[in-house]
Image (cartoon, rainbow, N blue to C red):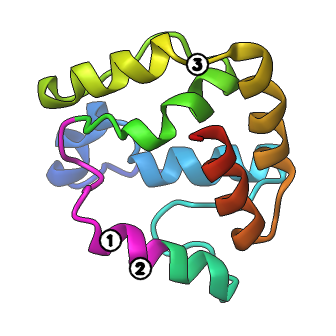
Amino acid sequence: MPQMTRPPLNRRLDGLGTTIFTEITALAQKHGAVNLGQGFPNFAGPAYVKDSAARAIGSDLNQYARMAGEPALTRLLLGFGLRNFSMHPAQLLAIKERVLRTNLAEAQPLAQRVLRQSDPRKTRELLAKLNA
């Protein structure tokens, strides 16, 4: 049987590997997770998720901007166990104040309740309680 040769373009692409979307799709399939790669999920999301996304887009805190350091989420992140923060220098004092005034014994159980919460209104109430 004669050996087939690949076109020159294919040979030049040999060392490039895969795309992030190929990697994410493979990982989602491997772990039985929802694929958040390009074109997925391929079903309608819940209205509260879409509403939340629209509010986030309207806040002008963009995905690829440098880290903004949202002071209102500092105690939640501390409650999740985060101890290293990345932020815009303009947010440093506000974040530092929140860190210094946070009672971890109170923040940790509230953060866990936020994780278990599916009702957006109750989630906002818990976040307000964390920031009180």
In 3D space, how far apart are the residues under numbered discs 1 and 3 (Cα atoms)?
Answer: 29 Å
Q: What amino acid type should be assigned to the residue bearing mark 2? A: Ala
In 3D space, how far apart are the residues under numbered discs 3 and 2 (Cα atoms)?
Answer: 30 Å
Q: Are marks 1 and 3 in contact (CB under 8 Å)?
A: no
Q: Which residue is mark 2?
A: 54
Q: Is residue 62 left or right of residue 21?
A: left
Q: Which residue is mark 3?
A: 102
Residue closest to the eye, 71 or 29: 71
Say what secondary structure mark 2 lies in. helix
Rendered image quadrant of residue 85: top left
| Residue plotted at (29% across, 75% down) | 58
Asked if residue 121 is positioned above or below residue 129 in the image, the reply reads below
Asked if residue 14 is positioned above or below residue 82 in the image, the reply reads below
Say what secondary structure mark 3 lies in. loop
Q: Is residue 58 left or right of residue 48?
A: left
**Residues shaded magenta:** 53-66
Nearest to N terminus: mark 1 or mark 3: 1
Q: Are marks 1 and 2 in contact (CB under 8 Å)?
A: yes
Magenta run includes residue 84: no
Magenta run includes residue 65: yes
Q: Which residue is mark 1?
A: 57
Q: Are marks 3 and 2 in contact (CB under 8 Å)?
A: no
Q: What amino acid type should be assigned to the residue bearing mark 1? A: Ile
